[in-house]
Image (cartoon, helix red, strand yellow):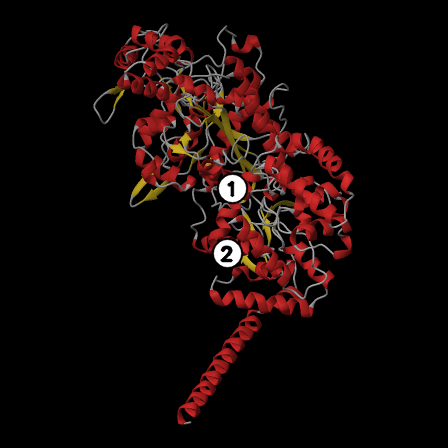
Amino acid sequence: MNLFSEGIHRAIKALLVFALLGGLFFGYIIAEVDEGGELAILASYQPTTPTRLYDNNGVVFAELYRHKQQLLKYQDIPPHVIQAFLSVEDNNFFNHFGIDFSAILRAAVVNVISGRIKQGGSTLTQQLAKTVLNNRKKSFIRKFVEALFTLQIEQEYSKEEILEIYFNLIYLGHGTTGLSSAADVYFHKDVSDLDVAEAALLARLPKAPVDYSPYKNPSASKRAHLEVLKLMASQGFVPEDKIQTIHDEFWEKYWPIVITQSPSQSTWGTKLNRAPHFTEFVRQRLLKELGEDRIYSGGLKIYTTLDIRKQEIAQDELRKALKKHDDMVSGVTVNYAGGADRGLVGLYNFIGSLFPVAPPFVSRLDDKANFRVALEKELIDSADVLSLLLPADNESAAFTEFQKRSAVFGKNLHVEGAAITIDHTNGYIQTMVGGYEFTPKNQFNRAVQARRQTGSSFKPFVYGAAIAERVVGSGTGIMDAPLTTLTEEGEGWSPQDFDGDFQGMVPLSRALSMSLNIVSVQVLLRTGADAVIDFASRLTKADKSRFMASPALALGIAELSPYEMAVGYSIIANKGRNVIPLSVRYVIDQSGNVIYNEEQKVREELDKETEDGSIQIISEGTAYILRKMLTMVAMGGTAANGLHSPDQGNYKGVAAGKTGSTSSFTNAWYCGFDPKLTTVIWMGFDKSSISLGRGQAAGVIAVPIWGKMYRRFYNGENYPSFEDEHGQDPQPEEVQGGGTCAYNGLSPKPGVCPVTQNLTLKPITVAGVTKSVQPNRQCDGDRDHHKSIDFREFLQMEYQISDEEIGKTDRKFKPNAD
């Protein structure tokens, strides 16, 4: 009896403990469901709003999102679409209470018989619960939470409301969340326009979006489509005798579409993005500031500095120019260096500095280079195949390596380019084009990331440093004659002008207009490399370590990006004051709160710099003189023809700028500005050793792009002027005027020499040392004139001098296209 009583007591205790634990467990599950607030999420559900980017005029030009969603109402969903999904996912939906035990039993039997998981027993409501709880960590407890949450959904919502929520939340592949987004990606239709066949295709996607994707696996999708139609027929939704007809007619039209579409087709492919390189530039910056979730899911409004109208003009003009030039140089290959002994060329240049010999010209390749060309064009493929058939592993590897290094691989490269425009009055980046196109394989933003030798477009920094140091003025005469200096290795180095000719003594402003290399080197040698590096570093905001302290620096061997060059020229255009480039002005969240304001930060920084005087990166006087000299380049120098000719840029306004071409025509630059905007154009190959073609200098290919862009910016009229409202262009206080002989930059002989303007900075005294521009000796008239370049035709245009007055000769001023 005692044993029996003890057994009862133990059983009661065990039952109480079990009940207590069960109650605690059930209470925990209830608490988990309530704490998660999932029902509240469903009650207030709103689709993820894309983050939108606006230009400075309030025009939306891009969207950012992970999955694009559009809210769908139950009454907007055609009955046959609902029937298709229920036939596949839950044909007993309107009869169960959230969990369908008959479906679970049926699935278990099918899976046991087949020996694998072939069928699931979860209801559509359970799938919805899993979707909502998807952010929770997977665990044993979660299964109970899902079951209870399913029952809560069924209790709180009608069947129609559950379907509406389901069709807004279900993931259907290729970045689509919700039926509305899927209808757009797969059929470019609204949900209300979907027919039975289209509904049947979509209905198979929830369980396996990748396996049954018509873009990734069209054959599997086609087979599954027929099975769904059969299921719909078994439920009485589709006439059984119409199944095959519906299936065949649909795929007859749809198959050619899906097999020609990219397997990566997604909502990303249909998203708004009218300025892809700029959008990516902004996205990367804001990811660091705001985080990924906020950017993609926050429904933010990002107000940028872009002008979408100007952006699309820049994209259009650059692409047309790149396409035209790419067609012209199609199949271009690397120029071989093996055709001449470079040591002999250097020696020849040195001799040329002592005696009047012509520049060296390589007329043909040597035997080694000829063999290489013949091997590439005629033998390499056959030799490679032969080596594969024979036991010649080493030879095969050698041929493969040769092919990798071969210039013939250059034919797969295309001419690329970049354009960037900065409003130098406020730092707004108004255009940014990073290449011919923006694709998954070509997202390199050359406007910001590509560093290339700048060629003669670097010369304004050399001249600017010399002007700031009071070494020269705009009219100072410098000798353009053979020059040899020693490199750090002790070798002779002799720069040459673009056309290999020498001009004699020339005024500095004309030397810049003609882009005379030797004059630039002499200016650097007079000024000092350190002063030039400091000047260039301050303007471009590039570290000093990136500039080599050698005479070749004057010819643009420094590698800079279009962005850095645009910053440098913007500061010159902004009267020497600092320009901080802006891409994002401010960001607003969905509640209207400003959560990020870069424009305010920049303004505060510039206000602080204004107070302490550091805003003046270079003096206003230096910037003024440089602008005057660069205006001569644009209006009458190397950029003039490409900028103004009707068949080229057809630009009718006044501007300032400088061309830049590097050795073997591998890079072409034009950096220019008007009173409002600074724009830099670059063209070249991504492989920097490939030439754009003989004679393809910046003035020929880069300058016309700039001209066409600006003509369209202003609709061909009302170009801004550097003059004020009174028609004046007053010079800063520190600038003093003067004149030099227009032939040679020497001090003019009264009554004999025509005079060109010579702007200099007034003398200053620093640490007891006075810096001032020293005048050249006086020109003695005809003798000095004849030793200088005959610039008489230019003088006739400049000063309206008649042929008789000037004594016209056959020699002409011909600025090169550098």
Q: Nearer the viewer, residue 296 or 304?
A: 296
Q: Is 348 situated left or right of 182 in this image?
A: left
- Answer few, some or many: residues within 10 Å of disc 2's Cα (few below 14, many 20 plus, some between 14 and 19): few
Give, as a three-letter code, the residue at label 1.
Answer: Asn
Q: Report which quarter residue 40 is drawn in.
A: bottom right
Query: From the image, which quarter does the N terminus lie in?
Result: bottom left
Do the residues under discs 2 and 1 have CB atoms within 8 angstroms? no
* Residue positioned 35% across, 30% down in the render: 774
Residue 682: give its label.
none
Q: Secondary structure at mark 2?
A: helix
Give, as a three-letter code, the residue at label 2.
Answer: Leu
Q: Is residue 127 visible?
A: no
Q: Which residue is mark 1?
A: 574
Q: Nearer the viewer, residue 683 or 271?
A: 271
Residue 472: % across, % down = 38, 30
Q: Secondary structure at mark 1?
A: loop
Residue 586: % across, % down = 57, 54
Q: Which residue is mark 2?
A: 290
In this view, the residue farthest toward the left is 490
